[in-house]
Amino acid sequence: MQTRHINRISKQRQQCSPILFVFLFCFNSMICLKSSARWSNLGASLILASRSMDTILNPLRIVSYAEKDQLFVGFQEVFQRLLDEILKKESRRNVLSIYGMGGLGKTTLYSTPDLLWSIIKSIQGCSEELLKLLKEMSERDLETHLRDLLKERKYLVVVDDLWHREAWESLKRALPDNNNGSRVILTTRKEDVAERVDDKGFSHKLRFLNKEESWDLLCKKLCPENKMGGIDLFSPLMKKLAEEMVDKCKGLPLAIVVLGGLLSHKRGVDQWQKVKTHLWQHMKNDSVEITHILSLSYNDLSFELKQCFLYFGIFREDEMIDTEKLMHLWLAEGFMPRMREVHMEDIAENFLHELISRSLIQVADTFFDKILTCRMHDLLRDLAVQKAMEVHLYDIYDPRVNSVTPFRHRHAIHTQTQRYLSLDVSKLKVRSILFFDNEFKNFDYSKKFMTFCMSFPHLYVLDLENILFDGNELPDAIGNLVHLKFLGLSNTNLFELPPSIGKLKSLQTLEALIFDNCSCKLPPQVAQLTNLRHLVSRYEVPLQVDRLTNLRTLKYICCDQWKDTDASGLVNLQELGMEKIRKSYSLKSIGSLKSLTTLFLVCRYGETFPPLEPLSSCENLHRLWLSGGIEELADLNKLPTSVTVLVLECARLKEDPMPILGKLPNLKHLELSWAYKGKQITCKGNSFGQLETLTLGNLEKLESWHLDTTALSVIKSLSIFGCLKLKKIPENILR
């Protein structure tokens, strides 16, 4: 384990100039393993430190304590140098640039307008009005708009994998130098871009790993639970084979971790020897080209896993992919094998984890033990697209060709949607259409768009995310797509769905999470969709969800729409998210959800929860998020003992919750945010015996923390922020 103190921090907020954080993407796993707001990793430490770029002086205000990231090898000195440059007391806007070839630690590719759009939307949100405004702006207009937003603000912008100096020149004009210590971190593959962005800035070329670091990285990939012993767990001959193979990777991290992922799924000397033999057949200049290592890892997958891997290529390059949506798409596409007594979603999750363990997919963001988003390295995506084209799995529309391949039944449209809609596709047997074109925002084309979709009566998948519709309405003709299994309407302007949606009897997933947190009016006919497994929507009117007995996910439901539900029939429901809860409401019906594993409950602003006792009946509940006031500390005694992840937000407790929470026998992750108004917390005896991560956030009156030596015995990560009065951290937790 290691401890990291961030030893500069803001004074009281009102005494500081505003600090704005704008992140396009953080570095990938070779530089900082995860980018997360939970501060418990090296990448987050960089972000944490930037909160205090020029300010003061107390190492106890923000503390990050975490176990060393498993695959953080070879770049510690780069990280420390970046940290030093960010914290340097230099008022001018400073640009820190890092460059190196693909596979060393950079992923995101943007056009210049995309860069400006991304930053503006991260500051202002993503309302319909803003999208229309941005659509009408020229590049120079976008520059001016962003410059006005950042004027007088302190900011940190991270731009990953910039390819052209021209894009930087445009971005530079939009990032004002307010002489307040703002910083820009930029990564690129091109040395001339890195060295010319700022004559006085910091520029660093990422090197290849040396022999020792390469071996260290492979060992950590092969034996993540035994970092010290590493490959010594294997036979001497296997160790020799591994040494020979990693040496041919020539220090390229991506090649090493993919090789490690492949070897980790092989057992015995014979299988490792076969891997080596294959690699040696493609030797060139005493090294193995990374494309051959990637291809070998792909060829080792089962047929079903190959389909799932190739499907990643259908998304745009460097897309942050929502893992739940991804798995729902896999289900709709029919990629999951049928197995007795095993749910398809469980198979999909196992597939995702195997692709991650093989280092073919990167985890981007998590909610403790749950993977929220993932991404694919661009070199691996190139492989996925190439192989997918060979087997005709899908077609990514290329406007330069102005046609689509008739043998490919899945279409992804990344650009030039209007031109795609003008194609003659009447003879094509298309099964899936996914739109990713953020520039398609013209209301005039919405009816033509739906007419086009009606040309494909056998569609299984239709993803319309980000499309704006004429009159804010989805045409009734959507009901003709009776074979549809996945319908994606998130981030659209559809505030009401037509009754014809009830004709989609095969529908498994309906995502209608309208932008700007608005509600969508679902027709009562949705209750007729008895095959529906995942419903993600804020809907206004009561809906007979108790008839949807196959539901496994129900998120963003308002409690007023739930209160009359007979939940006893929802025997498959595993994830429930409920909003706008009042004190007068009863949670009794939730107690009948015996399969529930994840529960998010959010009160109306300023409201408190009703009694929590019914939750004790949810015997399989693992993840629990409570956002709202809790009047009685004793309510926490009613939490089910099965809980492993607990977040208490805005609970405003007057008494110390730690003595009660410390008794939860399976609790591994705990976060308290604005949850306690007292001055002291105490962890006694053997409390929190299983707790691995603890986050204390914005406990504004907290002054002291008493910790017995036997408490928190297996803690791996501690994050503290916004606890400005806390005088010290217990010494025994820092050992």
Image (spheres, rainbow, N blue to C red):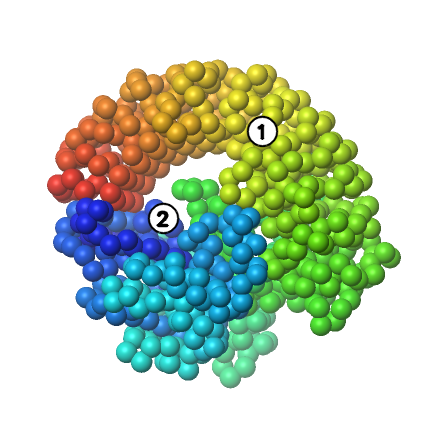
Q: Quadrant of residue 219?
A: bottom left
**Residue at the (57%, 71%) spot, across then down:** 291
Disc 1 secondary structure class: loop
**Residue at the (31%, 20%) spot, across then down:** 631
Residue 395 visible in image: no
Residue annotated with mark 2: 37
Residue 138 visible in image: yes
Q: Can you give x and y, in whole percent of width and height, for residue 401 in the image?
A: 74, 71
Residue annotated with mark 1: 540
Position of residue 358 in the picture relative to residue 708 (left or right): right
Position of residue 309 in the picture relative to residue 1 (left or right): right
Q: Quadrant of residue 633?
A: top left
Q: Nearer the viewer, residue 135 or 96?
A: 135
Q: Amino acid at mark 1?
A: Glu
Disc 2 secondary structure class: loop
Q: Nearer the viewer, residue 723 or 257?
A: 723
